Structures are given as C-alpha cells and as structure tokens.
Image (tube, rainbow, N blue to C red):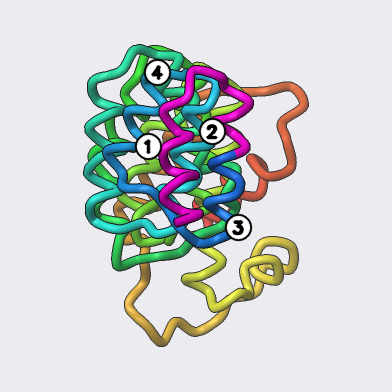
Amino acid sequence: RLIDDLKKLLADSDGFVVKSALTALGELNATPEPEQLIALGERLPSLEGDAVVMMLESESDEAIAAITKRFESSSTEPRVAILNAFLRRGISENEQMDAGWKPMLTQAIASPDPRLRRSAAEILNRRSTNLAAPLVGPLLADDDRETRLAAANVVLRILDEDQGGSLSTRVFESSSSTKTNKPIASAAQITAWHAAMSQHVESTPDWSLVAAIYATGNA
C-alpha cells in the first residue's frame, strides 16, 4: 500500500514531492517501471538525473532500452543529465550489460558538444575495459583537452588490466611482465592510440597523458 501511494506521488506537479517520493522508493528498493521514470524525467527535467540513477540500480534490459531511447530522442541538455547520472553511480563493471550501452555511448562520443564527449570518456573509465577498448580511440585526439585526458586515463586502465596490474612498474621502471591471457587491446589498437595522443603537443602535459603516450609507445 505504501509503495503504491509513493508511486502515485511521482505524478505530482511539485518537484520536491516527487523527489521525496523517489528517495523513499529507493530506500524501499521499489524501483518504478522504466516507462514511468522516463516520463517523470521528461516532465521534470531537474529530476531526469535522479530518475536515470534509479533505473541504473537494476540495469535491466528494459532500463537500458528506455534510457537509450530517451537519449537518442533528446536534445543536448537531457543527454548531459543522462550521462551525468552514470557518473553519479561510480564504477560499474557489468560486462553482461555493457553491450546494451554501446549505441548510446557511441552517439555521445560522436557528439559536437564537448560535454557529451567528455562525459562519455569518464563513463568508459567506470565501465568494463572490454567496452572501453573499442570506443576510446576517437576521444584520444579530441579537440577538448579534458576529454583527451579522461580518455588517456581509460587507456592506462586498459593497459594496466592487460598487464595484470603491473603497468606502473612497466611505465616507470621500463620492465615488462608476461601476458598470460588474451589482451583486451590489440597491438593495432595500441599503435592507433599512441598516434592519436601524439597529435596534440602540450608545453606542460598532464602526467596521465605522458604515461599513456609512453606506455602505448612501448607496448
């Protein structure tokens, strides 16, 4: 009964009431249907991120489809809110569901708005490396510096996983480790990443960019 009453409050015109109802439903682990949350976000743009965060808790096929559809049909600001919701969740390496997010992230990476590209790079650093590896390339040569730096961190994470967590030793001491599993990044990908990161010369480059260029040049 309480859950039903709270879900009814999601249709209220008062944003404070709706947010309070969302918070209470979250505490009760009673996530509304994706369609209801999408409609809420369309009606109250200030709560779009909260609605997406709630859907990401389950990360069901239905939630992925609903969020992707909303992203593809939205203007820039709702897209920014949707991607920022991913960043509020922290790290989520759900490889089983990663394929479902690929179309949305691919669209964000190709966006003319640097906010979307930057957020996409940051999301890749919070998802599985198997999702990140085929998508990060274009971001490494991005016109936006913050996007390039975020993408460089993605590369470092991929290479670190490929090296079994020994990348820091390999970068700073020039020693190598033996690979026992199939690498996430192919030699061709690493070569392309190195070339992309080398396109923008900086007088005082960030350490992560220096490390990523060095690592990819000595892979």
Report the quarter where the N terminus lies: bottom left
Query: On screen, 66 above or below 32?
Result: above
Spatial distance from mark 1 to mark 4, Cα to Cα? Answer: 10 Å
Res 27 label: 3
Please provide the residue range marked out in magenta: 1-20
Helix or strand or loop: what does disc 2 sit on? Answer: helix
The question of residue 15 being in magenta is answered with yes
Between marks 2 and 3, how big is the CA–CA gap? Answer: 21 Å
Do the residues bearing badges 4 and 2 touch, measured as CB atoms within 8 Å? Answer: no
Name the disc covering residue 101, or none: none
Query: N-terminal of the two: label 2 or label 3?
Result: 3
Mark 1 or mark 2, which has the lower sequence index? 1
Residue type beneath disc 4:
Arg
- Which residue corresponds to mark 4? 43
Q: Residue at x 37, y 39 (%)?
A: 137
Q: Kindly identify the amino acid type of the residue bearing the numbered disc 2.
A: Asn
Q: Identity of the amino acid at label 3?
A: Glu
Q: Secondary structure at mark 4?
A: helix
Q: Residue at x 67, y 23 (%)?
A: 202
Q: Which residue is mark 2?
A: 84
Mark 3 residue element: helix
Residue 141 screen position, x and y as percent: 45, 27
Give the mark nearer the N terminus: 4 vs 2: 4
Q: CA distance from mark 4 to mark 2?
A: 18 Å
Residue picked out by circle 1: 37
Report the predominant secondary structure element of the magenta stretch: helix
Q: Is residue 60 magenta?
A: no
Q: Earlier in the sequence, mark 4 or mark 3?
A: 3
Q: CA distance from mark 1 to mark 3?
A: 16 Å
